[in-house]
Image (cartoon, rainbow, N blue to C red):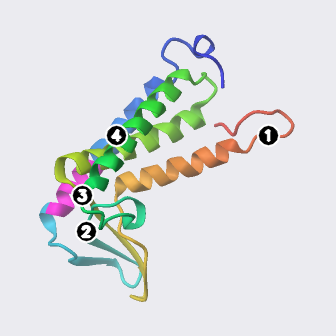
Amino acid sequence: MPNASAAGRFGRLSWLWLSVLVLVIDQASKFYFESSLTMYQQIVVIPDYFSWTLAYNTGAAFSFLAEGGGWQRWLFALIAVVVSAVLVVWLKRLGRNETWLAIALALVLGGALGNLYDRIALGHVIDFILVHWQNRWYFPAFNVADSAICVGAVMLALDMFKSKTSGESVHD
């Protein structure tokens, strides 16, 4: 990773617009579905595969520690704050040629902030996307923030694969 002087004064902080966009879309979609659906009501979008539903998650991914009694709300909020700060510093230190990595970090940051807002303001994260297979197999409900975090994480993983000939990261 280049040092801050090589990356310019603000690094790739210009990609924070993407984090804000993810945050706005996430919060708008959560507001819409929370005001349009009752808890666990399903609206089938693609029969046997995809539905809208309203669910609350007091835990982390896949409802991890959801039954923790309330302390997990603050633990996950603290983790999100620390991770968000690290991501902003990382973005600031990126060089001009690290666009792929900047996009990945901005997506993760926007998703983390979207779920952090829910966790602090509401005490739970609002989920509304349900993927299933013929009513036999259900993936845990998720939201736009979760999707952005997953896409960003996959991009980060791909960035770790260095080109053996050039030694550079995967970039656009």
Label 1 Cα neighbours within 10 Å, binned few <14 / some 14-19 / many ≥20: few
Q: Identify the secondary structure beneath mark 4.
A: helix
Q: Identify the secondary structure beneath mark 2.
A: strand
Q: Is residue 77 above or below residue 143?
A: above
- Residue at figure coordinates x 25%, y 68% from the top left: 55
- Residue type indicated by callout 2: Ala
Label 3 Cα neighbours within 10 Å, binned few <14 / some 14-19 / many ≥20: some
Which mark is in front, 3 or 2?
3
- Residue type indicated by callout 4: Leu
Say which residue label 3 marks.
70
Specify the quadrant of the image occupied by residue 44: bottom left
**Magenta region, residue range:** 26-34
- Residue type indicated by callout 1: Ser
Please report whichever mark, 3 or 4, sits nearer to the chain's N-terminal start: 4
- In the rendered image, residue 105 lying in the magenta stretch gets the answer no
In the rendered structure, the answer to whether residue 89 lies left or right of residue 59 reads: right
Could you give the CA–CA distance between mark 3 and mark 4, rounded to whole angstroms?
30 Å
Say which residue label 4 marks.
21
Which mark is in front, 2 or 1?
2
Q: Position of residue 155 (x, y in %)?
A: 58, 47
